[in-house]
Image (cartoon, rainbow, N blue to C red):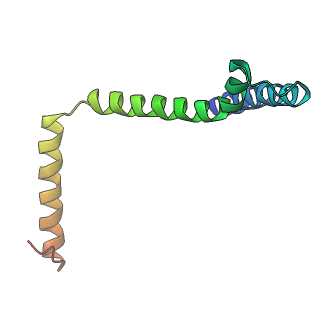
Amino acid sequence: MKRVHRLASLLSLFLAFWLVGVLQLQQASADRSWCALAVLWAPALAIVSLGCYLLARLIYGVMAFSSYPQETAALQQELQLAKEKMSKQGLWFGD
């Protein structure tokens, strides 16, 4: 639950700063400097950055995933044993 609270507090902090920036832009003149564009595009940039971060974590997780051949063989043996027991009880698996 701590991670959720941290994420919610960061999101509310970002939203507060963004709203302050937008309100300052409305009060200022209509100049479109790079700061004004940065404030207006900040939510889109945050979403794209979050997507890139999640994609990088997913790729790392897939690449760092370790397989255990011994456990795979043991699991296959247990599945075969379970199929044999269930076949004796009248279940059919289509094999």
Q: Residue furthest left?
A: 95
Q: Is residue 68 above or below residue 94?
A: above
Name the residue rendered at 87%, 25% in the picture. Answer: 29
Q: Nearer the viewer, residue 36 or 43?
A: 36
3 left or right of 51 in image: right
Tell me which corner region of the image, top left, top right, bottom left or bottom right, holds residue 93: bottom left
Which quadrant, please, contains the C terminus? bottom left
Q: Position of residue 16 (x, y in %)?
A: 81, 28
Name the residue rendered at 16%, 42% in the picture. Answer: 72
Q: Nearer the viewer, residue 51 or 85?
A: 51
49 left or right of 39 in image: left
Which quadrant, please, contains the N terminus? top right
Tell me which corner region of the image, top left, top right, bottom left or bottom right, holds residue 31: top right
Q: Position of residue 8 (x, y in %)?
A: 71, 33
Q: Position of residue 86 (x, y in %)?
A: 18, 70
Q: Residue furthest bottom?
A: 90
Q: Position of residue 73 (x, y in %)?
A: 11, 43
Number of numbered discs present? 0
5 left or right of 70 in image: right
Q: Is residue 71 above or below residue 84?
A: above
Name the residue rendered at 14%, 73% in the picture. Answer: 87
Name the residue rendered at 18%, 61% in the picture. Answer: 82
Q: Nearer the viewer, residue 93 or 15?
A: 15
